[in-house]
Amino acid sequence: MSGEISRRVTLAWVAAASLAGCETREQARQIDPPPVADAPPVADTAPDLWKEVALEPVTAPGYGHDPHLTSPSVPWPLTLDADQRASLRLAADLILPAEAHSPSGGSLQVDAFIDEWVSAPYPDQQRDRVLVVSGLVWLDAESKHRFGADFRQITDAQRRTIFDSIAFRDKVAPGLERPARFFARLRGLMLAGYYSAPEGVADLGYMGNAPYEGDYPGPTPEAKAHLNASLTRLGLKTVG
Amino acid sequence: MPQERHARHHARSRSHAFEPDVVIVGSGAAGGMAAYVLTKAGIKTLILEAGRDYDPATESAMLQWNYQAPLRATSTPDKHFGYYDATVNGGWEVEGEPYTNAQGSTFKWWRSRMLGGRTNHWGRHVPRFGPYDFKAKSRDGLGMDWPISYNDLAPYYDRSEKLIGVSGANSGLENHPDSSPGVLQPASRPRVPELAIQAAATDLGIPCVPSRYAVLTRPIHDRHAPRQACFNASSCGRGCAIGAAFQTTTSLLPMAMGTGRLRIVTDAMVSRVVTDARGRAKGVEYFDKKDGTTHFVAARAVVLAASACESARLLLNSHTSGSPQGLANASGQVGRNLMDTTGTNITGHIPALEGRPRYNEDGRDVAHVYIPFWLYKEQAAGKLDFPRGYHYELGGRFAMPGAGVAMAGNEDGYGVALKEDARRYYGAQISLTVRGEMIPNAGSYCELDSDTKDRFGIPVLRFHWKWSEHELRQIAHGMQTAGDIIARLGGKVLTPQQPPERAIADGGWIIHEVGTTRMGTNAGNSVTDNYGRTWEVDNLVIADGGVFTSNAHKNPTLTIMALAWRSMDHLAQRLRKGEV
């Protein structure tokens, strides 16, 4: 049996397990896969397409211990190529799609933020670079494996089926733990890039960073009413 | 102001023509206060600062957005507290100025190399020590009592609070002294997460009261250092261009400069205190970082205000044939009794705070209420398994989004639902941060590492560190109680469950290092008398946190300043009488 078929079988039973209401990976594992003739002993795990890429270290200088704080600039060159940026943009549009409240991740250039991040010469960012670049390689490999084309050439619906096997912490397809780690980090970076941008700040409803002279007024009546309703439910004394 | 800046510039270029009565090493909380008190008393004073000149009015990143900074202003090895943090050329490491740890020890030492030192970015939480804190050994037999009592320092607390500007309120609680009437500026109204914590704490019998911060809610009209009231925006750690958050660069230093009796030399790394044949301090020697030249400055008295560990290092490096183990160190106590504050952080997700109505929750950047230690009676009755106290500093609000989006541990999936979650969980996470007292122990100290020198050729410090069971039991109690408060709010603790020896922050991490030149009642048990004067060198005074005999859980900077004021009053009197 080819790896591709066994992979599809695996997906099928994981989907069945999800539909049956299994919430955790542990529960999912307890369900036997449907019997398949000639199944090799490892048929219930995905083919391991993950390869950790070897990258030349970034040697560009950082911004130093005394950068200009009121007119900041990013001194290091960006390192991602056009395909990588395009994949990130497509992913950002699915992970943080446009809806009534705010635009999509791609339109807020979350890919540019991630390029800035992974190209920085600091250890945390360099670790993220290996994870993100390896993850982008994996997305193409998985996409080719499932649909015969790069991540950029498949449809959004097809991209979603890939994300569905790695994006939900309790429903990660067996064998895809490393891609799931990549996804979790990518999502964290996208949330950061998106919600710290002006449109994201507005979407969250952050209303600060605006000088208010005079005594701080405290919560609005509406905010206080919400708190008091919560305190009442908890059996706590309300505030005046 | 332009005149002030001109005066400072002039001072730097002409420093050698100026003959000071007193030379102060350092321009932070202790050095700034020392310069203020001495110059107001008519004494010609020179400050030597190891860092560069710094002006918060033009350099601090007030009102900058995180998206304007590299990496959305996240912390990096170049800027350990984030891009916008005011610290210049400093952090856990300073280039070319290493320190080492003995095998098995982890101590972290935060330094900055800038005018105003660490006052430019500090937390500004300024509770007073109470009567018990000065005589703690008499209560529990541990450590050593201070040679002064609360009443000796109370007037200096009042004066210091009034001078630096403290907003907050008196609590009337046991061992949390009130300020005199008219000293404090008004407190700020608490925000929703603080009100929620206050409601739960009150229900559990735990006080939660207005906190005291060195952040103005009323302007201070000083001719040389006019300061505005806080405009309820921008993080204090970035430095305060309007002077609302206290730092010496916008207050004590320009006020002292206004007397015409202060000169400041920046980029001046002091290497040793020079003594004469009789063992009295003649002055100090320093490297000019700009041109690599060495200078000697003579003075009638030397004040060390370089920070507890840096001042101890200076004494150890100022050894002579007559004092081979370091200047003023016949007791062997220099570098010993090193203390930090204990710390751990407990975060919680509070479903009751999900999806709450938005409003501007910046306020004064700092916490508007806090939980002071409340178990003195239980402790006296022997009902606790740890000595001394701790407090909680409180966090949680609609904060400016940055490189970490706080979703209270609920980041999952993708798509429209993820965006709904981001909105729902924003502002639903709280934190209770433990700050507790450490008892000095024989395993926590610093000494010279003569194998390692900094870029000026000066031997560096090697740290030894260990916590005792006292601190670990206290941290365990703090974690448990924080969990109780979060549970009372129907919330879930997000911080991973860990034993206290793993949960406790590393030594130095809270940046409250004190005790390395402690004051005491006699030359055998301490380095200085109760005025910070070293027992052996009559005209050498230590003004920084090194003189702390114990380190109550109450953040040390206010006490550093009150002690410095008291010690400088004493030094000024002696100078006037010609005793020095």
Image: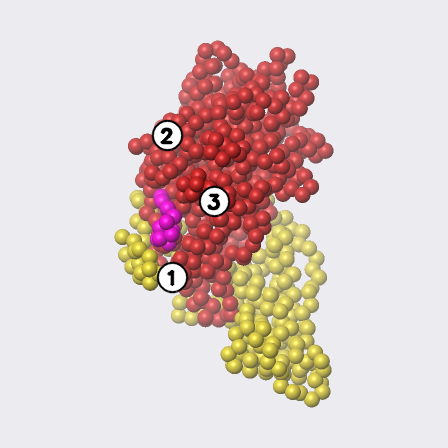
Q: Amino acid at mark 1?
A: Ala
The chain letter corresponding to red is B
> In the figure, is residue B342 to the left or right of B420?
right
Q: Which of disc 1 and disc 3 is earlier in sequence?
A: 1
Tell me the CA gap for discs 3 and 1: 32 Å
The chain letter corresponding to yellow is A
Residue sitting at x 63%, y 57% = A127
Q: Secondary structure at mark 3?
A: loop
Whether residue A97 is visible to the viewer of this picture, yes or no, is: no
Q: Secondary structure at mark 1?
A: helix
Query: Mark 2, residues whose alpha carbon is within 10 Å: few (<14), some, or many (≥20)?
Result: some
Q: Which residue is mark 1?
A: B352
Snapshot colouring: by chain
- B74 or A70: nearer the viewer: B74
Q: Are marks 1 and 2 on the same chain?
A: yes
Residue stretch rendered in magenta on the structure: B199-210
Q: Nearer the viewer, mark 3 or mark 2?
A: 3
Residue sitting at x 48%, y 64% = B410
Whether residue B222 is visible to the viewer of this picture, yes or no, is: yes
Q: Amino acid at mark 2?
A: Asp
Residue sitting at x 37%, y 46% = B207
Q: Which residue is mark 3?
A: B384
